[in-house]
Image (cartoon, rainbow, N blue to C red):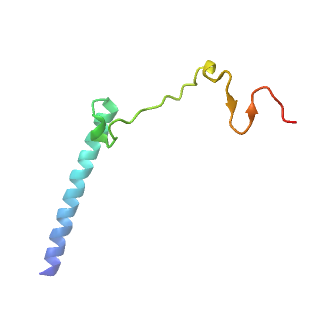
Amino acid sequence: MALQDDLTEVKRNLEELARSIIRLEQNLAQQREGTSPSAAVGRPEGLVTISDDPYDSSLWIDTDDEGLGARGRRAP
């Protein structure tokens, strides 16, 4: 009877895996459509996306590079 119990457990685990895969596929489809809330795709709330666009160069006027000294100066 132990073999039958093992087979039943394997079948139950496979069904649970199939349900999990279906949920994952649905979440991915929603994410691609842009309709999924961030919590549904596993993103923590309050997560901030930082753009890859370059920063305005005026932000760096009169700054020193750490460890390299002031801009425009040469090492002795």
| Quarter of the rendering occupied by the N terminus | bottom left
Horizontal and vertical percent for residue 69?
75, 34
Horizontal and vertical percent for residue 25?
28, 43
Residue in the picture at 79% in, 25% down = 72
On the image, which quarter does residue 70 sit in?
A: top right
Closest to the observer, 76 or 1: 76
Residue in the picture at 15% in, 69% down = 8
In this view, which residue lies farthest toward the bottom?
A: 1
Where is 13 relative to 42, above or below? below
On the image, which quarter does residue 36 sit in?
A: top left
Closest to the observer, 38 or 28: 38
Horizontal and vertical percent for residue 33?
31, 30
In this view, which residue lies farthest toward the top?
A: 58
| Quarter of the rendering occupied by the C terminus | top right
Horizontal side of residue 18 vs 34, given as left or right: left
Horizontal side of residue 53 vs 47, given as left or right: right
Q: How many marks can you see?
A: 0
In this view, which residue lies farthest toward the right?
A: 76
Horizontal and vertical percent for residue 66?
68, 37
Where is 44 relative to 57, above or below? below
In this view, which residue lies farthest toward the left?
A: 1
Horizontal side of residue 13 vs 46, given as left or right: left
Residue in the picture at 34% in, 41% down = 44
Closest to the observer, 10 or 39: 39
